[in-house]
Amino acid sequence: MKSWSDISNMSNLSDHSYNVEIDNSGISEKKSKFNGCFFVSIMTVGVVLLFIIAVTVLIFKTAKGSAATRIFSGSNQEIKDIQETVVADGDSDDKIVIISITGIIFGGDGISRQHSSSNKIIRQLRKAKQDPKVVAIILDMNTPGGGVTATDEIHHELQKVRESGIKILTCMRTMAASGGYYLAAGTDYVIANRLTLTGSIGVIIGGYNYADLFQKIGLQSEIYKSGKFKDILNMARTREESEARLIQDLVDETYAEFAEVVATGRNLTLDEVTSSPIGDARIFSGRQAQKLGLVDALGYLEDTIEAAIEMANTESPTIIRYAPKYSITDLLFSFAADSISQALPGKPGFIQKGTLYYLSPLAL
């Protein structure tokens, strides 16, 4: 039997002196040199930007079926291969697979490597299920949650994998809240760091209401609709009581689904889940979550691997980490999408107005 004590480390795979003469001619000369260097720097940046734009246009025109085509045409090209990285070799044929769930969970395919696409996670789960050597799966989780439907689709696939006999465990890292906990509740065993932020069991939907601002500047929204509630989330006007009640009913219904998943997965009563403190959507530390029965144990990735070995009743398995295999164009556009997402406020493309989320407020 090998020791897995170092698995977490393996998995996370001049000053210059100047002589200055203070006289008018010297200062003028230095200013002139500075202005010249500044002009050259600006020109260099401009040339680089033009080169990037040219390359981007070329990729758009030539990369059929690439990430660029998928973004703007809406097509869903399958990732043909899942990359397997060996974290630790074992003496037996058995495998334990690690699947990362990182960042905001969103539906469909996507090119961002900082967030999790439901389709890509589901494909990794199916690959593990089809591999007869896989005896356990570990969800390596660092997520504030995400879209309601996307999260539920992954949860649904998790249950099919569990029915096949493969054990699924969750390792919570910095955060595994809201939709992250929705997924964790659907696994066989949950280990959290004592400092993990988890919980936030609830639903949120919203946007910015700018009706008062429109009134102050004399701007008015003009909408033609076929039904009373067709523009229910028109943020250019105030909500009517009947509209607010309809939206809240939708939120309550979605929350009831969440509560049922947690109650079933954690062997709690529905009242225990919906009453305070769990039911008010507050955030817990890993230690607090364990006391409430939301987490089985406190520890690290190596502890989760040890638990997976024991639950799968295996010895010396090979530890594998799955990841989508990206093409060069995928990586280029992934880098661009992540850069834009970080540079602009509101996480454009991931958090959208009027969408239901199982999402921690820390991500908003």
Image (spheres, helix red, strand yellow):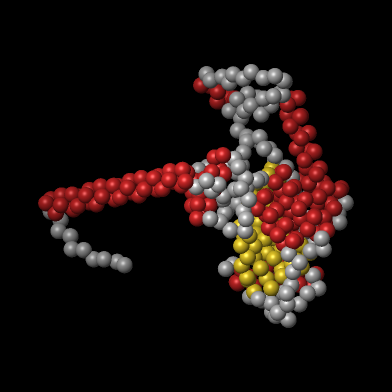
Question: Viewed as shown, does residue 29 lie left or right of 153?
Answer: left
Q: Residue at x 69, y 65 (%)?
A: 97
Question: Viewed as shown, does residue 361 lie left or right of 167?
Answer: left
Q: Nearer the viewer, residue 204 or 194?
A: 204
Q: Residue at x 60, y 42 (%)?
A: 75
Q: Residue at x 57, y 68 (%)?
A: 13
User: With respect to residue 112, does 213 lie above or below?
Assistant: above
Q: Is residue 59 visible?
A: yes
Residue at far bottom of view: 1
Residue 291: x, y in percent? 79, 60
The quadrant of the picture occupied by the C terminus is top right
User: With respect to residue 4, does 126 lie above or below?
Assistant: above
The quadrant of the picture occupied by the N terminus is bottom right
Residue 139: x, y in percent? 70, 60
Q: Nearer the viewer, residue 129 or 344?
A: 129
Residue 284: x, y in percent? 71, 55
Q: Is residue 173 visible?
A: no
Residue 50: x, y in percent? 36, 45
Q: Nearer the viewer, residue 70 or 105?
A: 70
- Count of numbered circles on the image: 0
Q: Residue at x 54, y 48 (%)?
A: 66
